[in-house]
Image (spheres, rainbow, N blue to C red):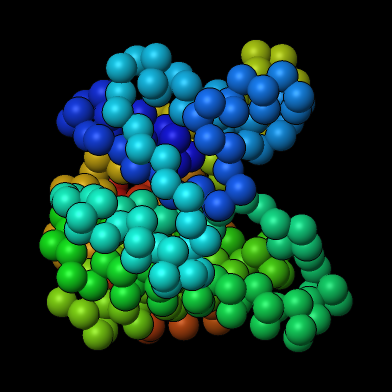
Amino acid sequence: MGFVLAEYLAQNIQAKLILIENPTFPEKEEYSQWLANHKQTDDTYNKIQKLQTLENFGKEVLVLRAEISNYEQMYECLAPENVAQLNGVIYSIGDVRENLFSSIPEFTKPKIEKLLNYKCSELTVLEKVLQARNLDFCITLSSLSAVLGGFGLATYSATNLFMDTVVQQHNQNYSSPWLTINWDRVQLDFTEEQKLIQPHETSLAIDKTEVIEVFKRVLGWNDVTQCVISTVNLEPRINRHSKKIYKILNRTFKKILFLVTQDPNLPILI
């Protein structure tokens, strides 16, 4: 999804893009060799292809390499002498790591502590590095699973909920608010065959056009700090999972916009 938003920003507001990858990400002169030696299912392979697509359209993309949880590396990357102007930041949970999707019986204390500590380190470092920046926006890409949970999503739900909580804590302590978007299922590459075989599933997934439309609307908001995206009416979904969850959500989050993409003219604000 990050590359979809990057492409939109580059094409519509001529934004200069900065992508922060891990230190092992190939250098530009190594792209061709990497593509030749790896399969299309490889995450790095796909990122390189998307980068090349942006560059082929004449877009300016700067790839920086750092471990996001490492303050020294991140500060060096985004230091004013290296990046003079920074207007906005988009942060996602990143690639799905091993065992991120697991059920409650697999939800061991050491595993979740390791994962949450890692995400906390990333967000804490990002907060420190951006503290002196005057940003137009800082958006974290979260999941609807943080609200609804889901079968086999114990670790994934907890990770996204934890990230949302860290963002809320930031907003309590700093005058420049961050915004969390909790996305329903996003599917950017359904094939025509999949659309024929699974018409109901594909019709409910959020596509590229809807991702961009949500992003455009979000950029225009000033007083919303969390946006929950559901492709169908959200309240019945929450009630099906647990009526208690909805009561807690309604009591805890004061500025959440539930946006139903199938009926964008009828948002529900609580």
Residue at left 13%, top 62%? 134
140 horizontally vs 82: left or right: right
Residue 138, horizontal then vertical, whole percent: 28, 59
- Any part of residue 54 in sight: yes
Residue at left 61%, top 20%? 32
Residue lying at the far right of the rendered structure:
105
Q: Quadrant of the C terminus?
A: bottom left
Does residue 162 sit above or below 137 in this rendering? below
- Say which quarter of the image contains residue 129: bottom left
- Say which quarter of the image contains residue 6: top left
Residue at left 63%, top 36%? 44
Residue 147, horizontal then vertical, whole percent: 53, 67
Q: Please name whichever residue, 98 or 48, is drawn nearer the observer in this view of the structure.
A: 48
- Say which quarter of the image contains residue 199: top right
Residue 224, horizontal then vertical, whole percent: 23, 64
Residue 28, horizontal then vertical, whole percent: 50, 29
121 horizontally vs 75: left or right: right
Does residue 236 sit above or below 248 in this rendering? above
Tally of numbered discs: 0
Q: Please name whichever residue, 86 or 221, is drawn nearer the observer in this view of the structure.
A: 86
Does residue 37 sit above or below 84 in this rendering? above
129 horizontally vs 94: left or right: left
- Any part of residue 198 in sight: no
Residue at left 71%, top 25%? 40
